[in-house]
Amino acid sequence: MKKLFAKHNNWFFKVGLILTVCMVGIVIIGQFWTPYDPNAMDAAAKAQGPSLKHLLGTDYFGRDIFSRILEGAGATLLIAFFVVLLGAGMGTLIGALTGYFGGVVDEILMRICDALTAFPSVLLALIALAILGPGRLNVIGVLALVFIPSFARIVRAEFSRIKKLNYVSLAKLQGVGHLRIMLRHILPNTLPVLLPAISIGFNNAVLAEASMSFLGVGVSASEVSLGRMLSDSQNYILRGMPWYAIFVGLTIALLILGFSLLGEGLQQED
Amino acid sequence: MLEVKNLRVHFKTAAPDRFAVDGTSFTVGDGEIVGLVGESGSGKSVTAMAISGLLPRRQSEYSGEIWLDGVEILNGDRNLMRQMQGDTIGVIFQEPMSAFDPIMPIGRQVEESLLVHHPEMSPAARRSAALTAMAEAELDEPETVYEKYPHELSGGMLQRAMIAAAIIHSPKLLLADEPTTALDVTIQGQILDLLKKINKTKGTSILFISHNMRVIRHLSERVLVMYRGKIVEQGSVEDVFLHPQEAYTKKLIDSIPARDRHLTGLKEILKGAGKE
């Protein structure tokens, strides 16, 4: 950790890290404690602006917006986490195998990735979700699939570059097997490229989930998420309650700002 | 110990009639140091790749036989080769700076072949074997160096670490492909003396590849001269140096810089190569 700080001693990294840690920290706390039950309605206090009692105000049913944002952001982050985990995991696996071994399998898998990248990813996810129907698991599956090619491409490029380096030859000359060379000698050396990609991946995943849910193909109506809330809150804007949409939008903005600053900071050394 | 019989290597990207190694045969005896000398592109490194098992199998076509310690390795499968790599055969090559994984401590890389060939060894036993090998390679303070990362060491130290990695399993053959080229002259001399010492004390055969005639003369008893994929001359160092039979060898010897001689030989070699 100390080394990471010394290596990336830039403002992008610092601000990004602070922002991300704060946001994710608040959201994680929100999973265990919220000021109010996110679903509790209070007829006496509906459609109120921000106040000390309700930090970010209440909606038309009298539900506390701050509590709901905490719960929604938690759901969104959880989805983003699994999307990045699956997307980066599968992408790394594919990229490692194709980059290291090359050959026919490389050609086939990379052409499939090309085909996936040729579609605008949002459109692709939209179509797939429209067919599969809404729901958390569907969102995770579809977005992870859409995310695989970008990770596969990055990791493949690094593997095919590093496998030609002398130290890989030397390891081979000592009889070291393919698996150990890939895991111990090449994979850790791809981290300078892979870490920023993962950070940006979070950024894209949050944004993609929000877009899908906003458009109504993301999480189902009974589930909460930031995108879903943004979609609900737009009805309130013209009814004199702009803060609902503003606070939800601000949460999304701060989350992705943190991730993308962190990613940018990780790419720049010192 | 090592016997190369009629080795031919052709890279698929090259012209069909162009062989990187074109019917090379030679032997290296037990405990012998043999020098393989030739200009860039003469096929000496490709020969080394074939012996060490680094020949890109899909991009090249090859024929002939390579016998190492009674086993034919050129046409054998990869598992056989892997058993020999880091066990019967040890390799040192040029550019020590790039020869180590930048994010793994040196010591862990020196002992890596033990992990592969002797998985039963405990980490502590591996560590002490690595420290012994590093001391044999004349690295000062092996305990300290063990924990260092490649960027913290000098080129000469890294070259010694590479030698330590190559001798940790007491190989029967040490393949040294221009191990001194990237080093300054003082360190060069030390590394050559070190190789000679390893040869004397452990009886390791060494195939030493270089384009530098003077280095070869300093080290080896027998020398092979390679030109355009063929061995054009071989014999004891004294014979080849004092009574070169081939015109090419003569010119190669003439090209050694000396205080009282001008570099005419090299130009003629280049002219000759261009004509063919």
Image: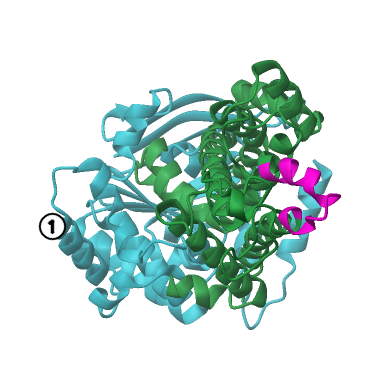
The spot of residue A223 in percent (x, y) is 57, 34
Chain letter belonging to callout 1: B
The spot of residue A217 in percent (x, y) is 70, 28
**Of B152 and B83, the residue lying toward us:** B152
Identify the secondary structure beneath mark 1.
helix
Q: Quadrant of the C terminus of chain A?
A: bottom right
The spot of residue A79 in percent (x, y) is 55, 40
**Residue, disc 1:** B125
Q: Main secondary structure of the magenta part?
A: helix
**Left-right relation of A195 to B93:** right
Q: Residue at x 64, y 77 (%)?
A: A10
Q: Residue at x 45, y 42 (%)?
A: A182
- The local crowd at label 1, few if under 14, some if 14 to 19, many if 20 or more residues have their Cα within 10 Å, is few
Q: Is residue B111 magenta?
A: no
**Left-right relation of B13 to A165:** right
Q: Residue furthest top?
A: A131
**Of A26 and A155, the residue lying toward us:** A26
**Of B203 and A9, the residue lying toward us:** A9
Total marks drawn? Answer: 1
**Above or below A212: residue B182:** below
Q: Colour of chain B?
A: cyan
Residue B144 sits in which quadrant? bottom left
Q: Colour of chain A?
A: green
Residues in magenta, as a range = A229-245
